[in-house]
Image (spheres, rainbow, N blue to C red):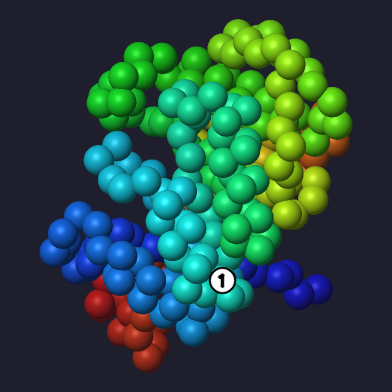
């Protein structure tokens, strides 16, 4: 039975790739616009807008890219811990409305203590994933609760939380997330719609996918999977291996 496949590309704020060294200013609005248009013309379904501690703001990059495209969807990387969940929910809902319902969010819990410290976060690796789980719970409640609510958890405490703006996509935008650690699987599998993986040997990937499914099942969830790979193209498999 055929399985639908979604092709996800990547938007950078400047001229750069894994093969092309970065050049020009750190932010170029026309590069963002043209990269988005190229992906749309090429038939990509979605593009990732990455999150880096030294990079331009992804929300604004997404808004600009959405303004120059019609069909292309956007996967906005977002790191919990720096924007309160109710505010993040409103920002994401606003961008989903602005883009005509073309937004998804990719939760980046943070794998590097040193990188987190650059923005003033000293939370431990395992605690960051617990925080992400609570963050996602608060996001969904903010998007869906019909009346003000209170929340008290390990990382967040709110009173009278309510958002008038809701996502264009109902009940809320698609949620992506990933991580190879046990802490990541336990925290994210019960919450995400798409669990993101790096390209690994097929047998290892199958085992990991089963772990994610088992962790998600008690919550009645069945996430699908995204696999990030770097294709090496040539006329034949042998030539591709030679190029690699």
| Residue 222 pos. (x, y %) | 78, 44
- Left or right of residue 116: residue 162: right
Left or right of 12, for residue 151: right
Q: Is residue 112 left or right of residue 130?
A: left
Q: Residue at x 55, y 20 (%)?
A: 131
Taking the spot 74% from the left edge, 54% from the top edge, the residue there is 169
The x and y percentages for residue 90 are 62, 38
Judge whether 40 appears above or below 152 on screen.
below
**What x and y, as percent, mark residue 66?**
51, 65
Q: Left or right of 181: which side holds 89?
A: right
Using the image as rendered, state which of residue 61 and residue 174 is in the foreground. Answer: 61
Q: Is residue 47 above or below residue 56?
A: below
Residue 191 is situated, as x and y percent measured from the top left of the image, at 70, 34
Q: Is residue 207 above or below residue 23?
A: above
Residue at 29% from the left image edge and 29% from the top image edge: 115
Task: State the residue in front, 79 or 128.
Answer: 79
User: Circle 1 sits on which residue?
Assistant: 72
Relative height, residue 159 to residue 198 (above, below)? above
Q: Quadrant of residue 238?
A: bottom left
Image-quadrant location for residue 61: bottom left
């Amino acid at each position: 039975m055929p399985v639908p496949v979604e092709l996800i590309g990547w938007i950078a704020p400047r001229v750069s790739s894994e093969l092309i060294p970065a050049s020009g200013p750190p932010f170029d609005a026309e590069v963002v616009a043209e990269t988005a248009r190229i992906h749309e013309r090429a038939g990509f379904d979605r593009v990732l807008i990455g999150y880096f501690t030294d990079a331009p703001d992804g929300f604004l990059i997404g808004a600009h890219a959405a303004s120059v495209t019609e069909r292309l969807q956007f996967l906005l990387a977002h790191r919990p811990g720096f924007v309160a969940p109710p505010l993040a929910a409103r920002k994401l809902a606003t961008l989903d409305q602005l883009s005509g319902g073309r937004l998804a969010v990719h939760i980046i819990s943070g794998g590097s203590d040193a990188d987190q410290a650059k923005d003033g976060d000293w939370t431990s690796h395992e605690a960051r994933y617990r925080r992400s789980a609570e963050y996602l719970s608060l996001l969904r409640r903010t998007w869906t609760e019909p009346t003000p609510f209170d929340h008290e958890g390990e990382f967040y405490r709110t009173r009278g939380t309510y958002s008038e703006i809701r996502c264009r996509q109902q009940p809320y935008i698609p949620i992506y997330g990933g991580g190879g650690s046990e802490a990541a699987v336990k925290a994210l599998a019960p919450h995400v719609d798409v669990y993101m993986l790096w390209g690994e040997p097929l047998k290892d990937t199958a085992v990991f996918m089963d772990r994610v499914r088992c962790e998600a099942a008690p919550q009645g969830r069945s996430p699908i999977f995204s696999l990030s790979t770097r294709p090496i193209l040539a006329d034949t498999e042998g030539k591709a291996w030679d190029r690699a």
